[in-house]
């Protein structure tokens, strides 16, 4: 196989910047973040005689999914990397000025020197489930906006009528998507089994379990529970400067913000109904942790339990979980 050239990609909503070194010379371009742009990238690589690349990009929500899948399908190696790793690498290289072009070079250098693990697309059934859930959540957001508008009490009758019609339409669409999600889960036994395992954890309901299965790609493939929590962005991060200044620890916030939000109320519920979590919270309160820190710690603990039930292919067992707490 020909040598894989490291290709750094900095993704944005409308465009992406790429950077590569070929025979000691920097090569850089910018393309539209759409199918035409992907094909132009392939043409650019072919013009330079590059047959295989190891393409690296940051995990930035949905912006990079199309490009990652395209590069994978045409035979390139792809790595989708936690932005915290790229940031750490940039700091180690003393890169202080942030531009898209520089970001692409930092990612290229990270790719070349660290050789991150290969990425694979999500399974079609998970991708479909994710699409259904995201659409339902979008409609729920729209429903909330229209409801708030209706409750403002400042609408003329024609506008009020329009809002009521929209709410009715949204109710119908949300119900239809809920039906499709349930049907999709029933048609895929492996997904259904994962949902059942996760929802066996007190505090996590079926809706949250389905979202976790859809958004976390393949829970059993994470190397450990901490890496799963890191993908959601609830692992501790600490600022340090020199030997005498220490900043307070905080969550990294690098990861799936949608899941962080979705786990908030399950964490609150688990604090009341999950014996492992109740004991955990008691310890945190004795340590005088403030409420926000406790909630984040509970979310992290719940994700560890999620990893446990999936990895062990067994429903939640408080006795087993207590030994792993």
Image (tube, rainbow, N blue to C red):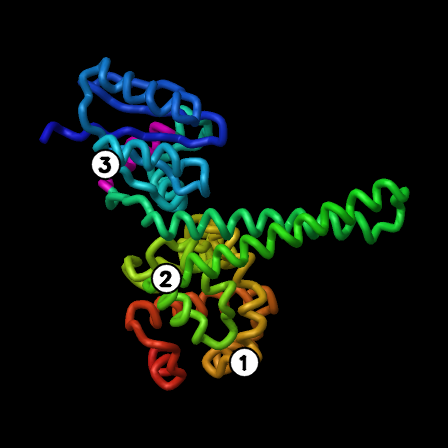
At which x and y percent is residue 106? Answer: 34, 32
- Examine the rendered structure and indicate whether residue 14 appears above or below residue 316: above
Q: Secondary structure at mark 1?
A: helix
- Direction left: furthest residue: 1
Residue with the mark numbered 2: 191
Residue with the mark numbered 3: 77
State the extent of the magenta-drawn residues as a range.
104-115
Q: Is residue 308 left or right of residue 250?
A: left
CA distance separating discs 2 and 3: 27 Å
Q: Is residue 78 left or right of residue 37?
A: left
Looking at this view, is 92 or 11 the one in front?
11
- Check if residue 61 falls in the magenta segment: no
Find residue 209 and name its label.
none
Q: Quadrant of the C terminus?
A: bottom left
- Direction bottom: furthest residue: 319
At which x and y percent is residue 208? Answer: 50, 63
Q: Secondary structure at mark 2?
A: helix
At which x and y percent is residue 175? Answer: 59, 56
Earlier in the chain: of badge 2 and badge 3, it is 3
CA distance separating discs 3 and 1: 45 Å
At which x and y percent is residue 88? Answer: 37, 43
Q: Is residue 285 left or right of residue 9?
A: right
Q: Residue 61 occupies which quadrant of the picture?
A: top left
Residue with the mark numbered 1: 273
Give the number of the mark in front: 2 or 3.
2
């Amino acid at each position: 196989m020909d040598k894989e050239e490291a290709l750094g990609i900095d993704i944005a909503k409308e465009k992406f910047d790429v950077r590569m070194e070929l025979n000691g010379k920097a090569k850089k371009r910018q393309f539209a973040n759409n199918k035409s742009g992907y094909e132009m990238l392939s043409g650019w690589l072919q013009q330079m005689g590059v047959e295989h690349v190891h393409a690296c990009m940051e995990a930035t929500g949905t912006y990079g999914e199309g490009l990652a899948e395209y590069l994978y399908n045409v035979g390139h190696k792809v790595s989708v990397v936690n932005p915290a790793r790229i940031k750490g690498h940039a700091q180690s290289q003393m890169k202080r000025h942030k531009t898209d072009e520089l970001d692409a070079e930092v990612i290229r250098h990270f790719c070349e020197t660290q050789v991150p693990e290969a990425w694979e697309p999500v399974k079609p059934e998970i991708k479909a489930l994710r699409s259904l859930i995201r659409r339902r959540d979008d409609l729920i957001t729209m429903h909330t906006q229209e409801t708030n508008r209706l409750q403002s009490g400042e609408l003329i009758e024609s506008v009020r009528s329009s809002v009521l019609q929209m709410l009715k339409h949204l109710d119908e669409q949300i119900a239809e998507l809920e039906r499709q999600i349930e049907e999709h889960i029933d048609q895929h036994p492996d997904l259904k089994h994962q949902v059942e395992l996760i929802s066996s954890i007190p505090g996590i309901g079926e809706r949250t379990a389905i979202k976790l299965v859809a958004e976390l790609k393949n829970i059993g493939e994470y190397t450990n529970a901490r890496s799963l929590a890191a993908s959601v962005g609830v692992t501790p991060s600490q600022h340090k400067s020199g030997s005498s200044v220490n900043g307070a620890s905080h969550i990294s916030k690098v990861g799936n913000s949608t899941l962080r939000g979705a786990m908030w109320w399950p964490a609150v519920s688990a604090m009341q109904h999950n014996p492992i979590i109740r004991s955990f919270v008691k310890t945190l309160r004795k340590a005088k942790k403030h409420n926000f820190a406790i909630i984040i710690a509970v979310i992290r603990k719940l994700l560890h339990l999620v990893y446990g039930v999936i990895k062990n292919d067994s429903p939640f067992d408080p006795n087993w979980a207590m030994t792993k707490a």
